[in-house]
């Protein structure tokens, strides 16, 4: 049972979280080994996260929470008015 099959990132409440990874393919395969249903992916990021190698991939845990894997090896885009940047873990 994979919880609510209609779970999506637009629902209110805590239903999804993101995890930064260096190797998105390896992380997705490891999640499968632990019973996570991985959706189609990985997918290239778009908008402010668009860049060479920037990707995301979603999986549904057996307890019904979406996990988003994300890797951002390329710089992010920011509005010129931005006063802060996103924190990304060091390699």
Image: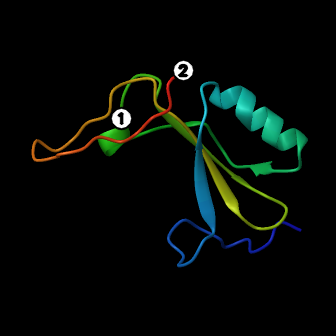
* Front label number (2 vs 1): 2
Q: Nearer the viewer, residue 7 or 23?
A: 23
Above or below, comparing residue 83 to residue 51 in the picture = below
Is 46 on the left or on the right of 5, as rendered?
A: left
Find numbered disc 2 in the image and state the secondary structure of the residue it sits on. Answer: loop
* Colouring rule applied to residues: rainbow
Which image quadrant is residue 69 in?
top right
Where is 64 relative to 88, above or below? below
**Tag count:** 2
Q: What residue is rendered at 73% in x and 71% in y?
A: 5
Q: Regarding mark 1 in the picture, which secondary structure is present there?
A: loop
The image quarter containing residue 16 is bottom right
Q: Which mark is residue 50?
A: 1
Q: Nearer the viewer, residue 44 or 64?
A: 64
The percent coordinates of residue 75 (x first, y second) are 33, 27
Rendered-image quadrant of the N terminus:
bottom right
CA separation in Å, label 2 and label 1: 20 Å
Residue at 50 percent of width and 32 percent of height: 89
- Where does the image place residue 52, in percent across and percent down from the top left? 40, 22
**On the image, numbered disc 2 is attached to which residue?**
91
Residue closest to the eye, 20 or 59? 20
The quadrant in which the C terminus is found is: top right
Q: Residue at x 79, y 58 (%)?
A: 61
């Amino acid at each position: 049972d994979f919880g609510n099959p209609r779970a999506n990132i637009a629902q209110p409440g805590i239903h999804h979280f993101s995890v930064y990874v260096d190797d998105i393919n390896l992380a997705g395969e490891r999640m499968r080994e632990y019973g996570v249903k991985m959706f189609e992916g990985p997918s290239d990021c778009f908008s402010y996260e668009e860049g060479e190698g920037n990707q995301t991939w979603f999986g549904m845990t057996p307890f019904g929470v979406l996990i988003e894997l994300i890797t951002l090896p390329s710089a992010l885009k920011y509005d010129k008015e931005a006063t802060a940047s996103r924190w990304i873990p060091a390699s």
